[in-house]
């Protein structure tokens, strides 16, 4: 049997039902994580929207809950889903929004003509992009989002990549909930194999712990001096035991991510010396003490030298459904003077 067919057959038996063949024009396979209810029940999505789009927000809320996600969004009415939103001073509202975003796994923006002009929606985009690194944009029918997608950039902090996916909102599409769920949980850089290994399926991963550790390290790297002049492509938290590596064997850890998370493109870019890999160590702070049993947390940092504006290009990852859009990697960085602790 062809190695790719064998990998696909094994993955289908473990619950995979969405995949892409000949990924990026190569003899490869991309396996998508499936939003299976039992394995996403602990994952939470923050909905960023304009108050005037509350009916749309309610519809998205109901869709995500039906799929199996937890959902957070601020509302003006006490009797509707989500905590109520009061008229607050700007600093207090920013702290409230930031606190809510820190407790979620993913950000979804409901982008309409009205929300695209709201400062709070832009704040939520900037803060979540900095912390989470991934954004799904639900686009109102016919809206041009090019002006909204002017990503913020700040000096004197680590340059942290944020990736976003744009999906058109059409509730009449029967498969929209499933595609929406896949867009939230699938990292565009993961799931790719050449047939020599099988990336883990959702049943074999702990996405909630992965997301929490990634957010911890993205925040930690902001103040690491050596990264203030670098562009951080990605942060991959790990433990030596989970990667079956001896202490200090970074090479084995790197190849564990290539095989188990399907990071084939990362392997290619490092082999061509386009990406660099470093080991980052952070003290185990109270926010992660329940999932890190050692005094020090660890992560691989994938980085390049300073980002240049002219290098902003689509990363070639396109969802295979016709209504989806290319995913982009843009420079995003945080200035703590502008975002609440």
Image: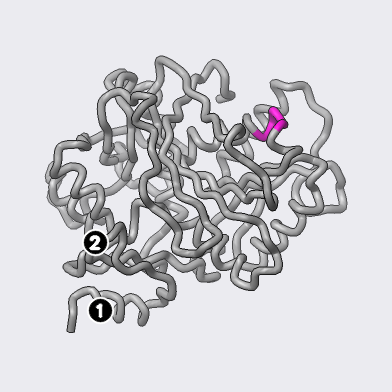
Any part of residue 10 in sight? yes
> Which of labels 1 and 2 is toward the front?
2
Residue marked by disc 2:
26
Tell me if residue 81 comes above or below residue 128 in the rendering. below
Q: For the image shown, how many numbered marks are present on the structure?
A: 2
Any part of residue 257 in sight? no
Q: What residue is rendered at 17% in x and 68% in y? A: 196
The numbered mark, 1 or 2, whose residue comes first in the sequence reads 1
Horizontal arrangement in the rendering, residue 103 relative to residue 132 (left or right): right
Image location of residue 173, percent across then percent down: 65, 69
Q: Can you say which quadrant of the picture contains the N terminus? A: bottom left
Tell me if residue 92 comes above or below residue 192 in the rendering. above
Hey, which quadrant is residue 14 in on the image?
bottom left
Q: What residue is rendered at 30% in x and 23% in y? A: 306
Instruction: Decide: few, some or many residues near mark 1? Use Cα within 10 Å; few <14, some 14-19, many ≥20.
Output: few
Image location of residue 299, percent across then percent down: 29, 40
Horizontal arrangement in the rendering, residue 20 relative to residue 41 (left or right): left
Q: Give SS at disc 1.
A: helix
Image location of residue 64, percent across then percent down: 64, 61
Residue marked by disc 1:
5
Image location of residue 54, percent across then percent down: 80, 48
Residue range of the region highlighted in magenta in the rendering: 117-121
- Main secondary structure of the magenta stretch: helix
**Which mark, residue 170?**
none
Tell me if residue 15 comes above or below residue 54 in the rendering. below
Q: Nearer the viewer, residue 280 or 151?
A: 151
Q: Give SS at disc 2.
A: loop
Q: What residue is rendered at 50% in x and 62% in y? A: 182
Instruction: Decide: few, some or many residues near mark 2? Use Cα within 10 Å; few <14, some 14-19, many ≥20.
Output: few
Q: What residue is rendered at 72% in x and 38% in y? A: 115
């Amino acid at each position: 049997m062809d190695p790719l067919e064998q990998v696909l057959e094994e993955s289908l038996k473990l619950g995979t039902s969405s995949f892409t063949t000949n990924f990026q024009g190569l003899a490869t396979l991309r396996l998508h994580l499936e939003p299976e209810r039992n394995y996403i029940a602990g994952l939470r999505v923050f909905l960023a929207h304009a108050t005037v789009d509350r009916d749309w927000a309610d519809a998205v809320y109901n869709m995500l809950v039906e799929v199996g996600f937890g959902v957070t969004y601020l509302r003006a009415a006490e009797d509707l889903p989500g905590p109520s939103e009061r008229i607050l001073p700007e600093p207090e509202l920013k702290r409230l929004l930031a606190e809510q975003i820190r407790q979620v796994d993913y950000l979804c923006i409901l982008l309409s003509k009205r929300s695209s002009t709201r400062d709070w929606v832009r704040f939520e985009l900037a803060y979540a992009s900095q912390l989470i690194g991934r954004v799904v944009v639900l686009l109102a029918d016919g809206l041009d989002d090019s002006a909204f997608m002017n990503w913020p950039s700040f000096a004197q902090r680590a340059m942290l990549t944020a990736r976003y996916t744009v999906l058109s909102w059409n509730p009449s599409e029967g498969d929209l909930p499933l595609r929406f769920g896949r867009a939230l949980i699938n990292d565009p850089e993961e799931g790719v194999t050449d047939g020599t290994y099988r990336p883990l399926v959702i049943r074999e991963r702990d996405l909630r712990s992965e997301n929490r550790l990634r957010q911890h390290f993205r925040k930690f790297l902001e103040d690491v001096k050596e990264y203030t002049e670098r562009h951080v492509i990605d942060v991959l938290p790990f433990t030596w035991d989970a990667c079956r590596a001896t202490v200090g064997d970074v090479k084995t850890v790197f190849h564990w991510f290539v095989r188990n998370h399907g990071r084939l493109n990362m392997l290619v870019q490092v082999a061509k010396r386009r990406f660099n890999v470093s080991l980052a160590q952070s003290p185990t702070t109270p926010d992660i003490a329940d999932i890190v049993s050692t005094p020090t947390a660890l992560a691989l940092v994938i980085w390049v030298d300073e980002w240049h504006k002219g290098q902003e290009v689509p990363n070639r990852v396109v969802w295979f459904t016709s209504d989806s859009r290319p995913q982009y990697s843009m420079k995003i960085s945080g200035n703590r003077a502008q975002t609440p602790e």
